[in-house]
Structure formats: C-alpha cells, structure tokens
Image: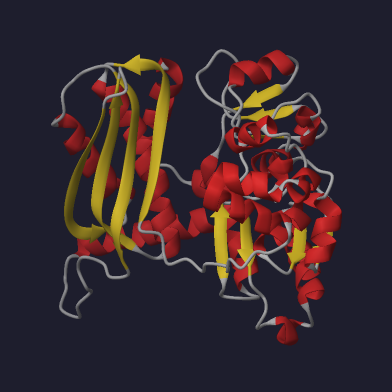
Amino acid sequence: MDAFYAAVEIRDNPELRGKQLIIGALPGERGVVSTCSYEARKFGVHSAMPISEAYRLCPNGTYLHPNFHKYEEASMLIHEIWSAYTDVVEYISLDEGFLDVTHSMEIFGGAAKIAHEIKDKIREQTGLTCSVGIGYSLMSAKLASEEKKPDGYFEILTAEALRNLIIDRNVRIIFGVGRQTAAELERIGVNTVRDIYNNRQAVLTLLGNHGKQIVDLADGIDNREVAAQAKSQSLGKEQTFQKDITDFEYLKDALRLMARELGYQIRLKGIYCRTVTLKVTYKGMKRITRSLSGESINSAGDIYNIAASLLDKIENRPVRLVGIALSGFTDTPAKQASLFDDDSSDRRVKKRDAVIMELQRRYGMDSVKTGSELSAEKRLKGGD
C-alpha cells in the first residue's frame, strides 16, 4: 500500500490532501514516525525517525496520532482481496505482503491481470492506492513493487533484468543489507551493487555466510519461498504515556479502551480467547506481564474485567506503558447454546451484543460506544 496510514487519514479527511502529513506522535511527545505522506518525505522525513527529528526537518507539517482500528479495518478488507487469488500469502505487515500466484495464474488469466485486478479492487473497495510488483523471486517482487510508487506497477521477470536495474544503486537495495552492514562494506570500498560484483571475494571474506547471501542476491539468486502463515497466536494493544502514570484508575480507563478494540477485532473474526495478559512497563523500563486463563471469551467487558483485576494485583509504581494481549484462540464459545436454556437475561445480552456488532461491522467500531467507554475517553482526553 502507498503511505498506508497517511492514505487512510487523507481518505477520511480530504482536507489533509497535499499536506505534509506525519503519523506517529505530536511535536514534543515521545515517539517515532509510523509513516508520512509523500509531501513530507520530500523534506527527508521517513518511518522510524524520532518525532523530534521529523519536526526539525518539517516544522510546518501536520502531525497526527495513529488510529490503528481504522488501519486494521482497511487491512482486513485488503487481505480479503489478496486471498481471493491465492492461499499462499505471506503478510509482512498490515499493508504489505507476498502472494505466490504460480498455481492460480491460469485461473485468473496471468500474473499481470491479477496485479491490475488487485489494484482496481483495492481502489474501488477502500478508496486507497497500492503499488504492485511482479517478480520471479521475493527480492525481485519487492523491488518491483517499490520501483514506480505511488500507485505503481512494475515487473522484474529475470535475474538479468534485476541485475541491470540495481547495478549502480547503493548496496542497501539488497535484502539483508542494513545500515551496519553497509558501513562495514563501505570500509572495503563496496558502496554499490557493481562494487559487489567487482569485489566478490572481499565481501565473502568480510561477512562469511552473510556475505555469500548478499553476493547471491546481487546476482539475482533468491530461492526463498513465500511462507504462508498460520493464524496469529496472539493479538495485542498497548499505550505508551507521554508522562509516567501513578493513577491506576487512569490506567484502567486506558485498558477499557484497549479491551474495546481487541474485543471488536476478535468478534469481527468470529473467534474467542482463553488467555488475557496484562503488560506493564514501569518507570526505569522494568517490564512485567501477568496472565489469567479460563473460559473462552470475546466481549470487551470480559477482557477489561480480567485486565483490570490483574492490574489491581501489581505494585503501584509510576507506569510508562500498559497493554493487553489475547491468546489461546478458539472458534468455540465458553457455553454452547442449548434448547433447554431459559436465561432470558443472558439471551438479551447476546442479542444486544449481536446488534452492536452488526452496527459496528457496517458503520465502524466508533459507531457504538458504551457509557463506560465514553467516560473513559473523556477522562483520558482530559488527563494525559
């Protein structure tokens, strides 16, 4: 996807279009850039950059906190579109993945046709753009997807085509060559891919097995396969505070909103969790976790109640980060419905939850909020 978080925000607020939009944290807060618009990238802003550095480079930018539930909703729809063409999909993140269409090309009319259909469907169904690369290998597909961004399409179909494309580019274009490895290579005079070709033995001597991988990839040799992934083993949400928090009721408000989002996500997937884990980072970076396992649940209220009870049992010290993780997923609820059940109160709760879920599915998670969730939002906005 193209500048995914920023693109979702611009889609939902067209007034942001054309602005130097930076998603992550606000100036003066702790945090890093999650992503930014292409207008901000012209100033040198990039993901993982400290927000203080981004503000120095782009003081007139528009800074926003990320809204992950919106991005996750868009991502789920995008993943559905991808999976219609193959079940061999390796998700790299919410907005990026590898699709092996080797065995489905004949069904859909070829890889190029699949690529353009994916681009069209994503635009029609989400209002967003993506860049698609077709390659004979993982690295060639990845490089092709980046070659014509944004809203691009590119093919690298042979090792020769890959070599011709990258020969005079910096070594960091090779998968596995990060800043530290690039610095080591620079010390032996290797700055570009052409330098790798001209100094193969020096690269092998310096980096050993890693050097062989780099030389092979530079030659276009990449035998890695798309790793289709199993269902996620855990799902979590956390919040880092700009100031350390000593008020545990404030922390519970944060947990309530996390539980709301996590409960929505697993209900959307039609699954339940058996384990709730509380994650806490104290001032000084000491980290602890506390877990409770039991019957399978998927309601925000149940998740919150467990997380809050775990919070009550830990040491009351200044907290930098708090979070919830869910695991032990199952498709089966704790209690199977019976013809002889006559708990009218329980049925009313289930009916209410089903109505709420349908409204949220249709209009988004924020379309329905409980009174306690509204109160928690109000207190958090007024307190932090």
In this rendering, the answer to whether 293 lies above or below 377 is below
**Camera-nearest residue between 201 and 86:** 201
Residue at position x 22%, y 36% from top? 308
In the image, 209: left or right of 171? Answer: left
- Residue 165 pos. (x, y %): 85, 54
Query: In this rendering, does residue 72 appear at all?
Result: no
- Residue 89 pos. (x, y %): 57, 68
- When asked about the image quadrant of residue 319, the answer is top left
- When asked about the image quadrant of residue 304, the answer is top left
Query: In this rendering, does residue 311 appear at all?
Result: yes
**Camera-nearest residue between 59 and 173:** 173
In the image, 82: left or right of 344? Answer: right
In the image, 92: left or right of 110? Answer: left
**Camera-nearest residue between 213 and 98:** 213
Q: Quadrant of the C terminus?
A: top left
- Residue 54 pos. (x, y %): 67, 20
